Image (cartoon, rainbow, N blue to C red):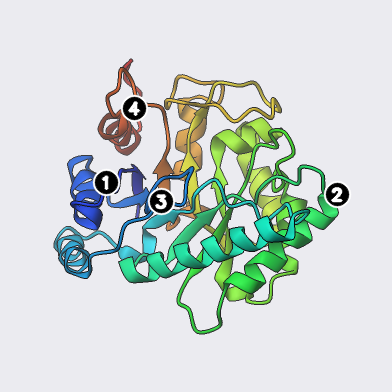
Amino acid sequence: MLYIGSHVSFNKDTQLIGVVQTAIENDANVFMFYTGSNQSTLRFPIDKNLTDKAHQIMLEHNIDREKCIIHAPFIINLANNSDERKYQFYIDFLKQEIDRCIALGINNLVLHPGSHVKVAKEEALLSVSNGLNEALKENQNIKILIEFMSGKGTEVGSTIDELKTILENVIYKDKVYICLDTCHINDAGYDLNNFDEFLNEFDQKIGIDKIKCIHINDSKNNLGAHKDRHENIGYGTIGFQTLINIIYNKRLEDVPKILETPFINDQSPYKTEIKIIREKKFIEFK
């Protein structure tokens, strides 16, 4: 079954109901959202009544909560432990986001591993694992999905080997998984025209069963640019057919695919992009 959706907005008035309604309007059957600003710690309380109503709407429209995603804010940087106070802040804020996920009944949390800045890369990778070890609890029904990054600046997590190192050093291995991103993989230097070769290496070193989400984005950049600039589906250097081949890869059939492509003239492209993905036929839309 194809699980396809996009990033959608979450606001304090409609909360999860608004997220679900937007997904339905886009003909999506999964979605992803931030529980507040992705660049600050400002958060509003989760309304249980709104959450319960949203869960009912999801049931009525066959939206599987186990496939839906929350994205952690960008300000969390577990890769840099050079300042103990800031590092502890990042861990504590991640704990709060985990609690919000649980309150919303959405148990998949995508997390950028962060940037090492002045820390050696090897230490930074272990710092990510250690931060996860402190943030996670054994009795939580939560999955942290470490995102595959483009390698921009001092980002970690832009190779299969780096992600493997993070996973090898976490305590709760049943709670830590991977989120792929097609733009990031391209910009990190992996040729997506040879996606099955990429999957073979990933399976050998980590295991395909660890992939729990794929961000579907075309790229404005050439292979290996390490820049992370998303483009609309079919308008970038990856191309429509290559992305279709990834979306419909049989080995990833049950993995949710989430669009994070740019708005066009302040308008969401997601309904159109979901349509052309379902029909496997590209049309000009910008």
In whole angstroms, how far apart are the C-alphas of marks 3 and 2?
Answer: 31 Å
- From the image, tell me which residue sits under label 2: 120
Relative to the observer, which residue lies in front, 270 or 251? 270
Question: Sequence-wise, which precedes: disc 2 or disc 4?
Answer: 2
Q: Nearer the viewer, mark 2 or mark 1?
A: 2
- The residue positioned 39% from the left and 65% from the top of the image is 100
- From the image, tell me which residue sits under label 3: 42
Q: Are marks 2 and 1 in contact (CB under 8 Å)?
A: no
Q: Relative to 152, is 166 above or below?
A: below
In whole angstroms, how far apart are the C-alphas of marks 2 and 4?
Answer: 46 Å
In whole angstroms, how far apart are the C-alphas of marks 1 and 4?
Answer: 17 Å
**Which quadrant, please, contains the N terminus?**
bottom left
**Does the image show residue 208?**
no
Question: Sequence-wise, which precedes: disc 3 or disc 2?
Answer: 3
Q: Relative to 150, is 175 above or below?
A: below
Residue 34 percent coordinates (x, y): 39, 50
Q: Are marks 2 and 4 in contact (CB under 8 Å)?
A: no
- From the image, tell me which residue sits under label 4: 281
Question: Sequence-wise, which precedes: disc 3 or disc 1?
Answer: 1
Q: Amino acid at mark 1?
A: Ala
Q: Amino acid at mark 3?
A: Leu
Q: Nearer the viewer, mark 3 or mark 1?
A: 3
